[in-house]
């Protein structure tokens, strides 16, 4: 694999709350810091493990709330403390992308930056890193902004799509437009059409290109931050976050910019958004799944049991349920409620805020 080692950087966005994985995921320890797969590594550690194959630890940055600094640096011990970028508040991904690009550009004006989530699962990391490397080379030789497009495997309604002029794995192609999350009929149409990719939320650009694009496409966001990268300080960052709107980089930049390219990749990807998606990721049949526990199951069907305790779990006659066993709480919930976790959590917070 060709490498541009000295100028390659990564920004891991680790500020998500992961509420749909409650009660395992909590405000002070969201899902990116959990070994949700029972693999011996947390999701953010698995992200880091992929990155160190293409760049040194000192070129990897993490952006998240200040409250996560200690747990992050504990789990990613090889990353310099100065590479932790503390956000004053949650303002979605556009301010995060801008702030991290300014900080890295100050260090290296020739920087090429991969900006990626902290909590995705990748079954084929070699394929992913090859696509990232292809995107790095394109970003080095142009002012294009690039995203990774995932080859769809089913008509998903929970992801945004990218329409491109052609789909060829590990090749750069032009983005024609971004498409909002579709209904099922449109998702089936996109899959049959063969010109659509899932939007992965992984972006590659040079620091100069993304800073220029903020100037031209999102001047309202850019103006909240100091005009010069050398003027960044804890005070000016706090002032910027007080003023800047909460908006995704997709809406603020990618849907407004004129030169967006995509590299298609099929890396065995999952965003593990919910307990049901975790069950499907491990076993897509109606079989039962257990993580971090060895329960006694009698006549259960399509049930997931996750535990962080040493309790012996006996489950009898459960069909289509998720069971999450924590030290301070036990949640037993039908799979049909999987998309309602956020609403359930609001009710729990009213009476048991310590459990959220």
Image (spheres, grey):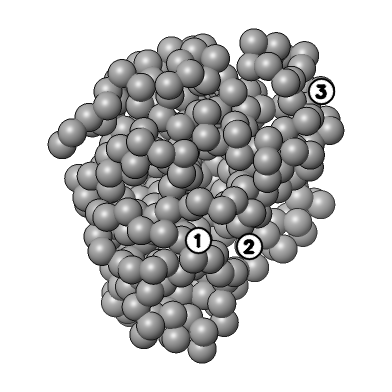
Residue, disc 3: 239
Residue situated furthest bottom in the rendering: 185
Name the residue: 38% across, 83% down. Answer: 193
Name the residue: 27% across, 55% down. Answer: 171
Cβ–Cβ under 8 Å for marks 2 and 1: yes
- Closer to the chain start, of discs 2 and 1, is 1
Against 99, is 284 above or below? Answer: below
Q: Which of 212/305 is in front?
A: 212
Q: Is residue 305 left or right of residue 25?
A: left
Q: Which of 142/282 is in front?
A: 142
- The local secondary structure at tag 1 comes to loop
Against 204, is 78 above or below? Answer: above
Location of residue 244 by image quarter: top right
Cβ–Cβ under 8 Å for marks 3 and 1: no
Q: Is residue 225 left or right of residue 324?
A: right
- The local secondary structure at tag 3 comes to helix
Q: Which of 355/87 is in front?
A: 87
Is residue 30 visible from the viewing direction of this image? yes
């Amino acid at each position: 694999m060709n490498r541009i080692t000295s100028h390659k950087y990564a920004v891991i966005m680790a500020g998500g709350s992961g509420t749909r994985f409650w009660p395992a995921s909590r405000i002070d320890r969201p899902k990116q810091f959990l070994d949700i797969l029972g693999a011996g590594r947390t999701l953010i550690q698995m992200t880091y493990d992929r990155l160190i194959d293409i760049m040194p630890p000192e070129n990897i940055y993490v952006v998240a709330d200040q409250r996560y600094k200690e747990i992050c640096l504990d789990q990613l011990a090889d990353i310099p403390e100065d590479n932790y970028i503390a956000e004053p508040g949650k303002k979605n991904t556009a301010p995060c992308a801008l702030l991290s690009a300014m900080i890295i550009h100050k260090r290296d004006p020739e920087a090429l930056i991969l900006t990626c989530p902290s909590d995705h699962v990748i079954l084929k990391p070699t394929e992913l890193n090859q696509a990232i490397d292809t995107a790095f080379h394109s970003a080095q030789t142009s002012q294009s902004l690039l995203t990774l497009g995932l080859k769809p495997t089913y008509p998903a309604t929970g992801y945004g799509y990218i329409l491109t002029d052609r789909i060829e794995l590990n090749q750069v192609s032009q983005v024609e437009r971004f498409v909002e999350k579709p209904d099922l009929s449109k998702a089936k149409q996109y899959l049959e059409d063969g010109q659509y990719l899932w939007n992965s939320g992984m972006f590659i650009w040079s620091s100069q290109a993304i800073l220029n694009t903020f100037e031209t496409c999102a001047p309202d966001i850019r103006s909240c931050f100091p005009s010069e990268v050398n003027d960044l300080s804890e005070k000016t960052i706090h002032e910027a976050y007080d003023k800047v709107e909460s908006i995704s980089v997709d809406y603020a930049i990618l849907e407004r910019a004129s030169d967006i390219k995509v590299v298609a990749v099929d890396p065995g990807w999952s965003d593990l958004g919910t307990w049901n998606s975790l069950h499907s990721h491990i076993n897509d049949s109606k079989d039962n799944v257990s993580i971090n526990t060895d329960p006694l199951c009698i006549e259960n069907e399509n049930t997931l049991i996750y535990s962080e305790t040493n309790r012996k779990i006996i489950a009898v006659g459960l069909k289509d349920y998720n069971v999450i066993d924590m030290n301070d709480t036990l949640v037993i919930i039908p799979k049909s409620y999987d998309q309602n976790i956020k609403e359930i959590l609001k009710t729990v917070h009213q009476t048991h805020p310590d459990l959220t």
